[in-house]
Image: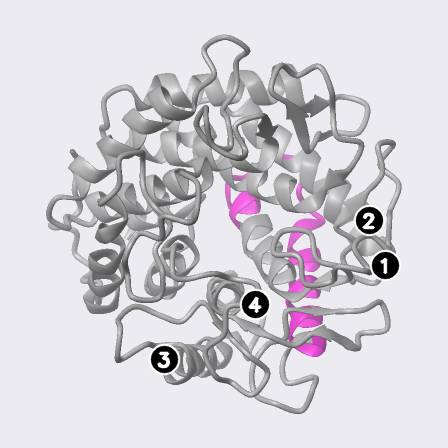
């Protein structure tokens, strides 16, 4: 495994180490990494998940790069599980859950993008076999999911790829952008940056811009906006109704990482990224009269789901740091400081460890949307990015310091 312990810039890793130490408990399961409950114990009520396994493989790969003990073995465990437990050798692609579990019949671009992110990052830090998993993820994404007519990925298929879901989603494509950026570096393939830009152009430059940066996330099979999607189920964890505040921040950061690559045709990105960032602040922070970011708002910028989710604050911090690093705002540095203080004050769980993943509107721990504490992925980046220079993804930032 590679490491960066001798780099001249010293990172403050105390919170990172605590996050990773809590996350290590996810390995106490037979398949990949398990879904941790609020106490840090694998919750057996959840099926083994390719999403959790991929996110934790990414997190342990980053931790390995930072030199945290034992994380190289954990990253290798994750890659092995992706290849053996979730890869469908018969039909191709990666199952959302292993055979015999709920979700085994589903192949999704969202999950596959996280497999690509995990495997690309693991390959970059020296995990054996990770390059092959990354290649398989790329192959299925472009052979099965890619919509050449739209320049985005389809959302999901049945097990044998015989039936495609008519819904198209920005969430899956956002994470595809992140994964393609990582894979472009890991696999030395600049064409993947071009694909990431093509996706960003569809979602952000066309649709978000047309809505005054109130980003639509749900589309029909022909790429038309569906602004009423999930109006009857507004608090869905992955497809909520309306505008998802945290995704405006997340797109802002990812766009600027893509722009940092120097790719041609990205001249529109700095202004778009800044506009998304400022819109998220405007419509998201304390819009219901209480401290914190709401989860979603409607098309009139009125709160719909007012639970406070940890990942939203984490993405706000990462975006603010990126906006500041790109010299696009005089106030972003203060935003980083304020939101880090908010994260520590409101979300840190001093009793059971790690960070709460959700608070209710009255700012008490809740689990109506996010269950337990399974995700180190968002918070790991928020703890590190403010300390790091610009780069195309978290790993490159670490290596650039």
The residue pinned by badge 4 equals: 368
Q: Is residue 125 visible?
A: no
Q: Is residue 198 visible?
A: yes
Quarter placement of the N terminus: top left
The Cα atoms of the two marked residues, 1 and 3, are separated by 34 Å
Range drawn in magenta: 257-283
The residue pinned by badge 3 equals: 344
The residue pinned by badge 2 equals: 207
In this picture, residue 240 sits left or right of residue 293: right
Q: Earlier in the sequence, mark 2 or mark 4?
A: 2
Q: Are marks 2 and 1 in contact (CB under 8 Å)?
A: yes
Rendering coords of residue 10 (x, y %): 18, 62
Q: Are marks 3 and 4 in contact (CB under 8 Å)?
A: no
Q: Residue at x 51, y 85 (%)?
A: 363
Q: Residue at x 38, y 28 (%)?
A: 186
The one of 242 and 208 positioned closer to us in this rendering: 242
Kindly state the secondary structure of the residue where label 4 is placed. Answer: loop
In this picture, residue 5 sits left or right of residue 124: left
Quadrant in the rendering for residue 103: top right
Q: Residue at x 60, y 63 (%)?
A: 246
27, above or below 331, in the image = above
The Cα atoms of the two marked residues, 1 and 4, are separated by 29 Å
Q: Residue at x 74, y 50 (%)?
A: 217
Q: Are marks 1 and 3 in contact (CB under 8 Å)?
A: no
The one of 12 and 71 positioned closer to us in this rendering: 71
**Residue neighbourhood size for the residue with mark 4, other residues' Cα within 10 Å, grouped as few (<14), some (14–19), many (≥20):** few
The Cα atoms of the two marked residues, 2 and 1, are separated by 6 Å
Query: Which of labels 2 and 3 is toward the front?
Result: 3
Quadrant in the rendering for residue 296: bottom right
């Amino acid at each position: 495994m590679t490491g960066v312990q001798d780099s001249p810039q010293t990172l403050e890793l105390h919170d990172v180490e605590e996050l990773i130490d809590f996350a290590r408990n996810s390995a106490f399961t037979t398949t990949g990494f398990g879904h941790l409950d609020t106490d840090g114990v694998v919750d057996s009520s959840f099926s083994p998940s390719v999403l959790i396994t991929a996110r934790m493989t990414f997190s342990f790969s980053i931790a390995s790069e930072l030199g945290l003990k034992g994380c190289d073995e954990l990253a290798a465990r994750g890659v092995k599980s992706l290849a053996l437990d979730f890869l469908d050798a018969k039909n191709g692609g990666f199952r959302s859950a292993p055979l015999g579990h709920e979700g085994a019949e589903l192949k999704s671009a969202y999950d596959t993008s996280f497999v690509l992110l995990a495997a690309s990052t693991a390959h970059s830090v020296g995990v054996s076999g990770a390059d092959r998993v990354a290649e398989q993820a790329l192959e299925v994404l472009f052979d099965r999911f890619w919509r050449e007519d739209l320049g985005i990925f389809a959302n999901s298929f049945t097990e044998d790829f015989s039936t495609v879901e008519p819904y198209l989603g920005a969430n899956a494509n956002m994470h595809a952008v992140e994964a393609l950026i990582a894979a472009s570096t890991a696999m030395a393939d600049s064409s993947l940056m071009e694909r990431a830009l093509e996706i960003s152009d569809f979602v952000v430059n066309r649709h978000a811009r047309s809505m005054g940066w109130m980003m639509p996330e749900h589309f029909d099979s022909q790429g038309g906006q569906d602004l009423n999607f999930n109006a009857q189920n507004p608090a869905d964890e992955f497809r909520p109704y309306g505008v998802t505040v945290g995704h405006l921040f997340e797109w802002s950061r990812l766009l600027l990482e893509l722009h940092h690559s120097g790719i041609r045709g990205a001249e529109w990105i700095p202004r778009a990224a800044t506009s998304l960032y400022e819109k998220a602040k405007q419509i998201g922070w304390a819009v219901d009269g209480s401290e914190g970011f709401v989860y979603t708002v409607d098309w009139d910028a009125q709160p719909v789901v007012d639970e406070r989710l940890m990942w939203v604050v984490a993405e706000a911090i990462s975006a603010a740091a990126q906006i500041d690093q790109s010299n696009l705002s005089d106030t972003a540095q203060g935003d980083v400081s304020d939101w880090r203080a908010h994260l520590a004050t409101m979300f840190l769980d001093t009793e059971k460890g790690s960070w709460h993943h959700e608070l209710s509107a009255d700012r008490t721990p809740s689990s109506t949307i996010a269950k337990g504490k399974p995700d180190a992925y968002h918070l790991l980046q928020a703890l590190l990015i403010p300390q790091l220079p610009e780069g195309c993804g978290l790993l490159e930032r670490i290596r650039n310091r």
